Image: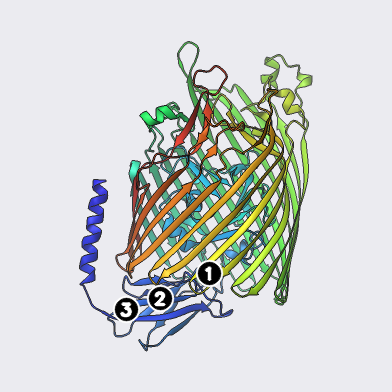
Amino acid sequence: MRATKRYLSTLLFISTILLFQTALSQSISGTVRDTETKEILPGASVVQKGTRRGTSTAADGSFTLSLLENKKPVLLVSFVGYSQKKYEIKQLDKLLLIELTPSTIQGGEIFVDDVRADQTDPVTQTTIKRAKIEKDNVGQDPVFTLARLTPSVLTHSDSGTRFANYSYIRLRGMDQTRINLTLNGVPLNDMIDQGVFFSNFNDFGNSIQSVQVQRGVGTSTNGTASYAGSINFESQNVSTGEPSAVAKLTAGSFGSHRISGKVSTGSINDFGFFGRFSNTGSDGYRFHSGTKSNTFFTSGGYFGDDNIVKVTAFIGRTQNELAYTPVPIDVIRDVPRTNNVSQNDEDNFGQQFFQLQYKRYLSEEFSVNSSVYYGGAGGDFPVGFNNAEGEFVQQLFSLENDHYGLKSTLQYNNGEGLELSGGIHTYRFDRINEESFAPQSEELTYADDSRKDEFSAFAKATYKVGDLQLYGDVQVRSVKLSLNPDISFLTDAGIPRSETSIPKRTWTFISPKIGLTYHFNDNFNVYSSFGRSGREPTRQDILGATNINASNLEVVQDVGSVKAEYTNDYEGGFRIQTSRSSAKINGFFMQFRNEISPTGAFIPEGFVQLRENISKSYRTGIEFQWEWRLLEPVTVSGNATWMQTNINSFSPGTSDQTFMDVESILSPEWLGNVTVRYQAFEWMDISLSGRYVGESFLELTNNPKFVMPSFFTANAGAEVRLSSSVSASLKINNLFDKLYFTNGAPLDTDFDGNFDTPGFIVQPPRHGFVEVKVNI
């Protein structure tokens, strides 16, 4: 905290000097809007050229800016997806009307509009633009940004930094294996385990132009089912603006750091290029939970009038000291940094991604959008323990996967209210799982392979007639999964070779969505929708272990042992925007059949959670999101969720005891975020935010002994524009040094077969980050 105090003192000294550096001449006011549609542009950046003076437009597109004395003041006005405009002020007492032109050379959003929902579609959604991502991002995984800016998101960090190492996200209480995640419409999920590990490619948020979170079934998308919802990332635009270079230096608590360099050519004769390199690291808050990571992200292409070709690629390599096991609450209270995973356990994973996109405008009404892509990942995950003789043994779990796919979409828009689109997506996903013991890792004790193939097709229509907007969407997914065991491993365990074969699993899912939106006026609409989605089980759901062995072979051979899960999703709400505020309120009811629910228990190795089918269950709730310009320099924003869950009946393991009407695990009834942002000066913003999470159960019998307690945390931040090219920010999180948890599980500490204490993965105490950004 001494360093924090010194930093704040320096900021106060600088601000005092700058306040008396020059006198203000007068304020200028105006409005920023789209030059074509005349739509107002809230959140547009307005900066006086050559100074640190800047502001952003309010919900009604208006702004007020105090100018430094200048004979010919010039404003630089910019907004995501629009060309920057230089506006010379000729009359200081005139109300300005500044119109921005959409980028004529588009490199980003045109490639995600086939999987994203329009802002008026009857889909429960939140879209976050780059400006807000930039304000929150200091190099942390993007899931932590989503937790602050969208409703119904719960996250946790293994290392206790919420910066690096493994991070996890839950949406409406459901884990990330049931969330569809894509980049430019291409799947990021591991198709067989269905999760996403941003730790493999750290600082991902630094290359993102926008992200849309759809809660519930939502629109048709590519890859794993949009079951709890979908998260679609759009890579940074590469063909707009001027050539630029940006350096970011971040330092923070727990030895955390981020060094990032980025270059962009802007538009040069219809070509554009963007590249970013990042080095990220942290010691971790919990003992021996550090991270070392390097990532490279690039995008570029040709952006003509009728043809657009874009290439996007990234590669990352990360080493994480592991910290995945919950710790008994009594131990945490005594030594919060406790990490029971061996200090010798450090994984080593890499991930790579390549996408080639092509867009062709066939006419004013028709266009076709196609992509081919490759994704791959691999590495070693060690688990160390003492054997019966007391000797330390380290088992290595290794995997390699390759993911090949293509998608193509045909779109039609007659410009008079009718929009049609349809497309296909297909992929092949190959996985190899291996086990060995260090240091003889080349001597395999187990090896199997898996393959998954999918073909899907969708058709979508939107029709606007008067004030009514009708929406329909249907997708068909055909999925095949092959699990091929290590035959030698099974025969050595006494299984006849003739009894080792495992039949293929096949599923066909038909997912319809219908809805309507009624527009009372341009600023107020209501919507309702119904959607249905189905999701196949993961490899881990089927195995309940890391490998196929004598004890689970019979279950794996039974294709009906773990059933596919289905949800009927009912959504409805309203969206309103006034000159000073905007709000979205929606209700949902998700009815599940055969939900694949976590029970609270883990396999002996500790990093795979056990799940089983639940016959009947549901989730229902209300979500609220708002932003309000309270005073000219003060904005209040936030979101909140009230949710109830119900599982009709649950019988643990082989027990004959049945528990009726229990709640799902890790699904708090209340979630809420609020942020107050104050523009103290044109060159300085201050923010204060708070987050509340209600209590939730850790296991499905709802034993009150195993509950994750509620908590409230507060954060503060300051951003200073030191010049037109240099800015700095300070973030202090968990101001009140609250001991809190967002993930945990019941533990059996005496190994008698019964849970005896709750265990948690502690989240970070008071900590801070300082970042300096230099535009070259």
Report the amino acid beneath label 2.
Leu
- Structural distance between the alpha carbons of marks 3 and 1: 26 Å
* Label 3 environment density (alpha carbons within 10 Å; few <14, some 14–19, many ≥20): many
Q: Is residue 267 left or right of residue 768?
A: right
* Quadrant of the image occupied by residue 303: bottom right
- Quadrant for residue 520, please give it: bottom right
**SS at circle 1:** loop
Task: Give the residue pinned by disc 3.
Answer: 67
366 or 322: which is nearer to us?
Answer: 322
Mark 3 against mark 1, which lies toward the viewer? 3
As drawn, 744 above or below 247: above
Q: CA distance from mark 2 to mark 1?
A: 15 Å
Kindly identify the amino acid type of the residue bearing the numbered disc 1: Gly
Residue under label 1: 81
Identify the residue shown where x is 25% and y is 55%: 8
Mark 3 vs mark 2: give the one in front.
3
Q: Are marks 3 and 1 in contact (CB under 8 Å)?
A: no
Residue 115, relative to residue 90: is it above or below?
Answer: above
Quarter occupied by the C terminus: bottom left
Q: Which mark is residue 76?
A: 2
Q: Earlier in the sequence, mark 3 or mark 2?
A: 3
- Distance from disc 3 to disc 2, alpha carbons, whole Å, reads 13 Å
Q: Position of residue 45 (x, y in %)?
A: 43, 71
- Foreground residue among 429 and 511: 511
Mark 2, residues whose alpha carbon is within 10 Å: few (<14), some, or many (≥20)?
some
